[in-house]
Amino acid sequence: MQFGTDGLRGVAGTELTAELTLALGRASARVLGGPRFLIARDTRLSSSWLETALAAGLAAEGVDVELLGVLPTPGLAWHSAQEGVPAAMISASHNPYQDNGIKLFAAGGIKLTDPVEARLEAELAGPPAPTTDIGLVRRRMRADEPYQAFLVSSLEGRTLDGLSIVIDCANGAASHVAPAVLEELGCDVEVLAARPDGLNINADCGSNHPERLQAQVLASRADVGLAFDGDADRVIAVDHTGRLIDGDHLIAMCAIDLAERAALKDDTVVVTVMTNLGFRLAMAERGIKVVETGVGDRYVLEALDAGGLTLGGEQSGHVIFRQLATTGDGVLTGLQVLDLVQRSGKRLAALADAAMTSLPQVLRNVRVAKRGIDVSAAIAEDVRAVQAELGDHGRVLIRPSGTEPLVRVMVEAPTQELADSAAGRLVAAVERACS
């Protein structure tokens, strides 16, 4: 198994096995080093035994392991940054409960670079070196409390008194943290999908399935809805009309706000190739420069740190406030957006509309059985023909998924009809190339 966009991921027990996880623990100890390692997990059924296997591998190499229990991925990254030790999150993010994964952080809460992942893969491929060292595994209680205190402190003493919020915790890692923080900050909070049973994580809930949240925001006449994914490193919002507000709009709103307060370093924001063309046009109108990266919040982080920049993220709702965090944090992002709503005295809908207008965008996933095909090269002529038709008023992006056997086809165009037509032609081209 190879590392994807966000660590190892696969079906628990068949692709991501206890044996592989133990071996990864040993390899991680050798490559990432250090006398101590942190592990946290989400709420899916397999996370507990994967936690045990990973801890055993680390301890077998003489590393002391602290188990933080159920905690959002950004909460683990925060502990890693505060304590200066490497860490591992056991989660498959927005995937169903049958899947699981392992995300690794270097000391300081930073996701691994490609060269470090290559070293880990090489270690996994070879036999472990013998060692007589033995590490200790212990469980840390209430690891969520200092992370919750950090989230509250991010508003610098301001509160969210009077805001009515509906949140969808995806029956995942934010099920306790998010309601507690929002209530402490004074919100009137209604909570959905916060009763994890090991099987219901992301099941018809969370950021990938926001329909129930949208309906409840309307039924409760709430100000804002927030939907997290299973490990709470991303968020999407719902305005008072029930409309979804994606990561592009959230980043645009926050970039404009930070720029107006002279807090957006170099008036620059970092986004990925998936970000809507409307975002780029809106930033250009306001004199905000845009740096583009590949898909994955670790690439956004690398660009932020390379330029000493402040804000970046993805359309999916991974948003990094670099002065506060080392990774995408759904709860933190939700708090920053709610704080903007509170400070401005405006509705989320008005802020989103003023920030940018999305061009019609079609994203189609094509499942592929045949591996090793350079799809972009195989359909290059089809892509050139579509791009010529769209001109400067649209764009095309073809890329393989980093986590699933899919090819993602994205088209943006001035009209929905044109975007649908172009995407259909490209999907057919991908299917021909992969058949």
Image (tube, grey):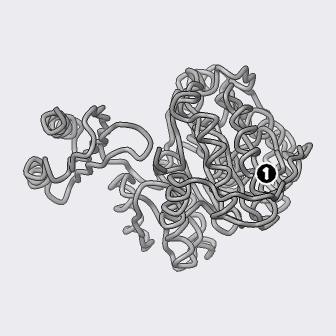
Q: How many marks?
A: 1
Q: Residue furthest right?
A: 141
The picture places residue 270, in percent across and down from the top left corner, at 48, 66
SS for dot 1: helix
Tell me where residue 173 sits by quadrant. Answer: top right
Q: Foreground: 413 or 293?
A: 293
The picture places residue 121, in percent across and down from the top left corner, at 50, 55
Q: Foreground: 31 or 429?
A: 31
Q: Foreground: 278 or 372?
A: 372
Above or below residue 249? Residue 263 is below
Q: Foreground: 244 or 89?
A: 89
The picture places residue 388, in percent across and down from the top left corner, at 9, 55
Q: In this image, 59 relative to 234: left or right?
A: right
What residue appears at the point 83 percent right and 58 percent down from the top-left corner? 153
What residue appears at the point 59 percent right and 30 percent down from the top-left corner? 206
| Label 1 crowd (10 A; few <14 / some 14-19 / many >=20) | many
Above or below residue 197? Residue 316 is below
Residue 225 seen from this side: no
Q: In this image, 285 relative to 192: left or right?
A: left
Residue 57 seen from this side: yes
Above or below residue 75? Residue 175 is above
Q: Residue under circle 1?
A: 59
What residue appears at the point 54 percent right and 71 percent down from the top-left corner? 304
Q: In this image, 107 relative to 269: left or right?
A: right
- What amino acid is at disc 1? Ala
Q: In this image, 317 relative to 321: left or right?
A: left
Which quarter shows the C terminus?
Answer: top left
The picture places residue 169, in percent across and down from the top left corner, at 68, 32
